[in-house]
């Protein structure tokens, strides 16, 4: 069983489109709210990673929109990370609306690792690897 | 992919065939005929068209099968120029302490 980190988001007026539902691009920033909570827990926020001399750009993004969210909905956004098989990190996301137990969206982002000079890193190492290992172990506990 | 000993494939033609099959298997390109991977065609970009995530998969496959570690893009630039370059890189690095 995967362990997820949860965050809450309340839909703001400015996030709703003329159809009165959340505009599709907004869900990605909701994912980011939960990913930030997860990364902060393991000292892996973007600014900490920059201090270690790396960047972690997204190279792949998927999102499935299951049901519309509306103005003032309180949403539960969940994030976890898969066990990496290469020097990349794939995060999984779910957005739920607890009020009616609706699943709103599911998504996935994949990030790679670049050096300060923009060179791609093919293997995790050092303190960064230790922090990533801790986060991966938290999200994927042994049965 | 079947286990093979280095002695059986260290000669270039056998190694190239092994690498063609390894690329197809590790990148899940089963629709590709191994013969379509040309010896001197670039593996990335305009050649075979592999991307950065494919590079990471190949790095893991090469380390697993040959014990050869490619740490970063700088080393990868030499190894991933073409199939010929990859075979030469592996032949040079296998067994290096």
Image (cartoon, rainbow, N blue to C red):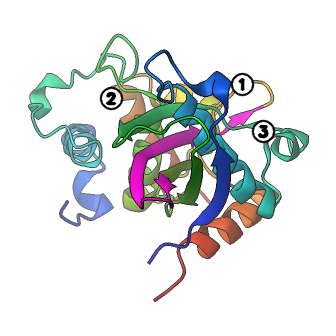
Could you tell me which residue is drawn at 57 percent across and 29 percent down? A26
In this picture, residue A94 sits left or right of residue B83: right
Q: Quadrant of residue A19?
A: top left
Q: Residue A54 carries which label?
A: 3
What secondary structure characterizes most of the magenta part? strand
Give the x, y percent position of residue A115.
75, 34
Nearer the observer, A74 or A118: A74
- Magenta stretch, residue numbers: A95-115
Discs 3 and 2 lie in a common subunit: no
Mark 2 or 1, which is nearer the eye?
Answer: 1
Question: Mark 1 Cα within 10 Å, few/some/many (few <14, many 20+)?
Answer: few
Magenta span has B90? no
* Tags 3 and 1 touching, CB below 8 Å: no
Q: Quadrant of residue A57?
A: top right
Q: Name the residue under label 2.
A: B83
- Image quarter of the C terminus of chain A: bottom left
Question: Mark 3 Cα within 10 Å, few/some/many (few <14, many 20+)?
Answer: many
Kindly give the residue lying farthest to the right in the view shown.
Answer: A51
């Amino acid at each position: 069983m995967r362990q997820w980190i949860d965050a809450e988001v309340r839909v703001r007026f400015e996030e709703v489109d003329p159809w009165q539902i959340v505009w599709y691009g907004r869900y990605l920033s909701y994912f980011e709210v939960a990913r930030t909570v997860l990364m902060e827990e393991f000292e892996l926020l973007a600014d900490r990673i920059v201090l270690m001399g790396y960047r972690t750009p997204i190279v792949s993004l998927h999102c499935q929109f299951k049901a519309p969210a509306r103005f003032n909905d309180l949403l539960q956004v969940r994030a976890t990370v898969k066990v990496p098989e290469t020097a990349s990190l794939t995060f999984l996301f779910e957005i739920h609306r607890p009020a009616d137990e609706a699943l709103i969206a599911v998504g996935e982002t994949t990030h790679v690792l670049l050096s300060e000079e923009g060179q791609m890193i093919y293997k995790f190492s050092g303190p960064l690897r230790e922090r990533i290992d801790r986060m991966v172990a938290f999200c994927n506990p042994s049965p | 992919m079947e286990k093979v000993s280095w002695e059986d494939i260290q000669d270039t033609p056998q190694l190239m065939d092994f690498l063609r099959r390894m690329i197809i298997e590790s990148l899940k390109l089963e629709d590709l005929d191994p013969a379509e991977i040309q010896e001197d065609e670039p593996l990335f970009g305009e050649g075979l068209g592999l991307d950065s995530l494919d590079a990471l998969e190949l790095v893991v496959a090469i380390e697993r099968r040959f014990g050869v570690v490619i740490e970063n893009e700088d080393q990868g630039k030499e190894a991933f120029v073409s199939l010929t370059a990859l075979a030469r890189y592996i032949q040079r690095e296998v067994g290096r302490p």
